[in-house]
Image (cartoon, rainbow, N blue to C red):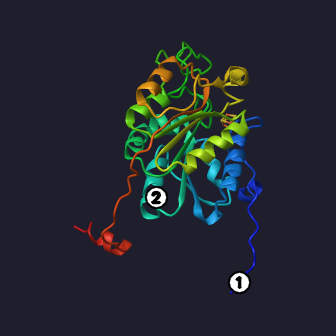
Amino acid sequence: MDTAVVPPLRAKDYKSDIHPVWCPGCGHFAVLATLTKAAAQLGLRKEDLAVVSGIGCSSRLPAYLDSYGFHGVHGRALAAGAGLKAARPDLTVVVAGGDGDGFSIGGNHFLHACRRNMDMTYIVMDNEVYGMTKGQASPTTQSDWTRSKLTPHGTGVRPFQPAAIALAAGATFIARGFSGDPKALTKLLVEAIEHPGFAFVQVLSPCQTFQPEQKTWKEQVHPWPQGPTDDPVEATRLIQLDDGMAQGLLYRRPHPVWRPEFTQRATLGEIEAGFYL
Ligand code: SF4
Ligand code: MG
């Protein structure tokens, strides 16, 4: 019998040897670092962690981790993550991506992931812009943002409200973090991963290149006026008063986790045969 003691993993052990291609100063560096710290604090084995993403700057994240990862198609990260969790409930599934990927292309998946309450964590690195395609307005862009040539007079559309939508759709853990406060963000990610159910963490993660104004976010963030609530009415009240810069855990409520029951397992060949005409 092998009695060798395996030393606990350090945060840096979860990083792959691929160097991120993000711009210097991008907020996503801190999100990557905090996720590795959270994994180390939770004592996760690398082979038990799977990080699933869509498309965008932030969705490159799985490549920078030495865990299981899947870099999927635009807006479908939650669908892929849900499928993985259904097939392998033993894995810790973390889905990660950006505001465009998650709230526009993947908006429908976001709604249904919230109401389904599968046991996984969804991190949205929100910089209010499509960064990878060079700076177009996203669902969370402020309506008077004129930097993009595509919207020289602003979008004229009210920004998407992620926390409000998540609450209305039935999410059981709703939090907002800030990449400039890695200590608090690590704590939030630990709590999110530990939460039995769908945990949604919106992370304010500045885009230095296309939203340089976001440098001021570090002066603007502040805690929610009160600690987390399990009352959806109280959470609604706090969201209505929110200026978008409150950080911390807003809402956590116990609710049965949805887990599909498989009555039979089929091989890929058997599944394919079912589609033959
Ligand atoms: Fe980060 Fe913006 Fe650069 Fe993308 S374009 S890597 S979001 S700073
Ligand atoms: Mg974005």
Camera-nearest residue between 150 and 31? 31
Q: Residue 12: x, y in percent?
A: 77, 55
- Height in image: 4 above or below 240? below
Disc 1 residue crowd, few under 14, some 14–19, many 20+, Cα 10 Å: few
* SS label for mark 1: loop
Disc sitting over residue 178 in the figure: none
Distance CA(mark 2)–CA(mark 1)? 31 Å
- Height in image: 3 above or below 220? below
- Height in image: 9 above or below 245? below
Label 2 with label 1: CB-CB less than 8 Å: no
Kind of residue at badge 2:
Lys
- Snapshot quadrant of residue 207: top right
Q: What residue sits 38% from the left and 72% below the top?
A: 268
**Image region (quadrant) for ligand 1:** top right
Say whether mark 1 is within 8 Å of ligand 1: no
Q: Which residue is mark 2?
A: 85
Q: Residue 273: x, y in percent?
A: 28, 72
Say whether mark 2 is within 8 Å of ligand 2: no
Q: Residue 214: x, y in percent?
A: 68, 24
Q: Which residue is mark 1?
A: 2
Q: What residue sits 67% from the left and 30% below the top?
A: 206
Q: Residue 146: x, y in percent?
A: 59, 16
* SS label for mark 2: helix
Q: What residue sits 43% from the left and 37% below the top?
A: 107
Q: Is residue 158 visible?
A: yes
